[in-house]
Image: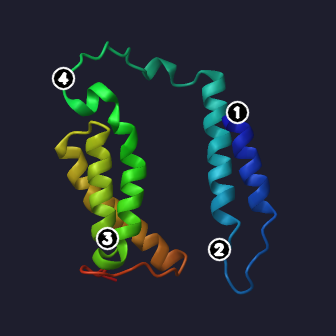
């Protein structure tokens, strides 16, 4: 299914018209994602990487409200809503950093991993949008260094 979804995304992306005068057009990202999904689907189907998996231990009920009721599933839509409401005021870098940090913590990442990821990931995404795609993102409180 994953490979089929990737093939559909790549096919749909290949049908998008090119933009005159630009090297990277609207077809680039759907095709990149599509080919990535095809590769991932093939790797899963062939069982490559299965030896790297660690057997999952039974999770103890920590007793917290969020883990008991599975409220972590509300983190992605909640973070998306936060982005929509906060990006104009805070800017992309701060909003993206907060979202990456809270998302990593919600997925039980350690603080040592979540904090550097929250600093580096929004900078790289902003750089890609600004330099490669030439799409401006909101500056807000903290503007990008470029």
Q: What is the spatial separation of the Cα atoms under label 2 and label 1, in whole angstroms? A: 28 Å
Earlier sequence position, callout 3 versus callout 2: 2
Which label belongs to residue 1?
A: 1
Residue in the foreground of this view, choosing between 79 and 13: 79
| Pointer 1 local density, CA inside 10 Å: few below 14, some 14–19, many at least 20 | few
Q: What is the spatial separation of the Cα atoms under label 4 and label 2, in whole angstroms? A: 50 Å
Residue depth check, mark 3 versus mark 4: number of the one nearer the observer: 4
Can you say which quadrant of the picture contains the N terminus? top right
| Pointer 3 local density, CA inside 10 Å: few below 14, some 14–19, many at least 20 | many
Q: Secondary structure at mark 2?
A: loop
Q: Secondary structure at mark 1?
A: loop
- Marks 2/1 in contact by CB < 8 Å: the verdict is no
Residue 130 against residue 111 in the figure, above or below = below
Residue in the foreground of this view, choosing between 66 and 141: 66
Residue underneath mark 3: 93
Q: What is the spatial separation of the Cα atoms under label 3 and label 4, in whole angstroms? A: 35 Å
Please name the residue shown 43% across and 22% down the image: 52
């Amino acid at each position: 299914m994953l490979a089929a979804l990737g093939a559909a995304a790549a096919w749909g992306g290949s049908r998008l018209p090119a933009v005159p005068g630009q090297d990277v057009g609207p077809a680039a990202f759907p095709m990149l994602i599509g080919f990535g999904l095809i590769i991932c689907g093939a790797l899963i189907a062939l069982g490559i990487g299965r030896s790297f998996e660690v057997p999952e231990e039974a999770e103890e009920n920590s007793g917290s409200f969020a883990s008991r009721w599975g409220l972590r599933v509300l983190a992605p839509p909640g973070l998306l809503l936060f982005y929509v409401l906060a990006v104009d005021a805070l800017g992309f870098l701060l909003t993206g950093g907060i979202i990456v940090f809270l998302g990593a913590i919600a997925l039980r990442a350690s603080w040592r991993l979540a904090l550097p990821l929250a600093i580096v990931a929004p900078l790289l995404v902003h750089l890609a949008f600004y330099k490669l795609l030439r799409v401006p993102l909101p500056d807000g409180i903290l503007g990008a260094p470029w």
